[in-house]
Image (spheres, helix red, strand yellow):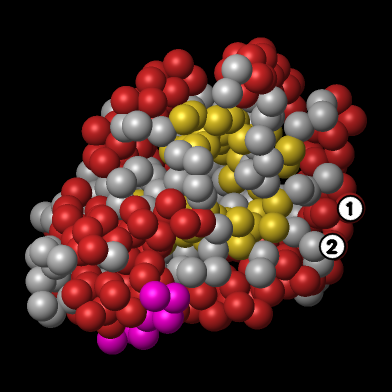
Amino acid sequence: MDELWKASREIRPILEKTLSGERLTMEEAVRLLESDDVLALGMAADLVRQRKHPGGVVTYIIDRNVNYTNICIQSCHFCAFYRPPGSPEGYVLPLEELFEKIQEMIAVGGTGILLQGGLNPYLKIDYYENLLRAITERYRIHLHCFSPTEIVHIARVSKLSIREVIRRLKAAGLGSIPGGGGEILDDEIRRRIGRKTTAEEWLTVMRLAHEEGLRTTATMVIGFGESLWHRARHLERIRALQDETGGFTAFIPWTYQPENTELGRGGWLEATAVEYLKLLAVSRLYLDNVDHLQVSWLTQGLKVAQVGLRFGADDFGSTIIEENVVTAAGVPRISVSEAEIRRVITDAGFRPRQRDTLYRPVERLEERLADSTR
């Protein structure tokens, strides 16, 4: 901890506390988020990362984000992707087109798909079961599908319990659940942005998924005008559920992209890169029971994401062969090659390693050769 001797007097005791193995409180998290001592935060988070993940490895995944429908009844104020029922621009992706996307992903070394869509009132549980079975009958890939918001919607339109929906989807081939729809886990903020599922509903889906043997990710989106207390409370709710179930594989924070959205037309200011890096560091310090922390190069760009690897993150996320929701909100359509991700990780002083959705290493020939020479 000698490296932190330059930390400001306001936060040094907090950093020393967490580095000695004690848990942060919400009040302490807010004080860290308020601090301008960004380098000290990053240094402390980097030390925690090194302890959790010795060896200097940063992981990444090759997968594809497929949006099976853009028809949605929720009308979130921050979303530019959805189309209401009856819109001529609405779609449900044909199976053959989905299969083509999967083939393209497999051809470049991909291991799974992240399947998400709008809350389509015309699709009930049998559609989702048939969709998952159609994929698993053709391909041996991991299916990371349907955010908690979608699970709640499927249960409502199908007149089933959330647990029954999760059980039936798992039986049909569901491998894990993404953390989309988390935004800020506070109903005051969720009402402001038009999110109709409550924080407790999101947490309930995750709890039940963990109880049914499915791993999930946890997410957070900042930049909705929330306070630092809202952000700290979100971290607390994730940590508390992880204490209870142990089912989260990773925490993935990113920033709201306001362009082309109803919420953004009011002159909304985006969260800054400094805010993002501070949140990343505090997340690593606070979430002592979540193994992995992922940077968001899609919303922050490659340079800031690279810096984030020194602010506690150990995972670079996906090559993102396809992405439609964030790009609809004004982020340029981007896909980064595997070679570029490996270069960025290497230039930051780490060893890149491909993983699958559950953070298991994907063996590659060049890595076997490199390991054999060490």
| Residue at x 26%, y 41% (from the top left corner) | 307
Q: Which residues are magenta?
A: 20-27
Of 129 and 45, nearer the camera is: 45
| Quadrant containing the N terminus in the rendered view | bottom left
Left or right: 284 in relation to 370? left
Which residue is label 1 attached to?
Answer: 171
Image side of residue 206 versus residue 265, left or right: right
Q: Quadrant of residue 91?
A: top right
Q: Position of residue 70 (x, y in %)?
A: 53, 42
Residue 145, given in percent of the width and then of the height, sits at 66, 47
Residue at point 80% right, 41% down?
Answer: 132
- Residue 272 is covered by the magenta coloring: no
Q: Nearer the viewer, residue 283 or 49?
A: 49
Tags 1 and 2 in contact by the CB under 8 Å rule? yes
Secondary structure state at the residue bearing disc 1: helix
Q: Label 1 amino acid? A: Ala
Q: Name the amino acid, label 2.
A: Arg
Q: Residue at x 63, y 44 (%)?
A: 359
Q: Which residue is mark 2?
A: 167
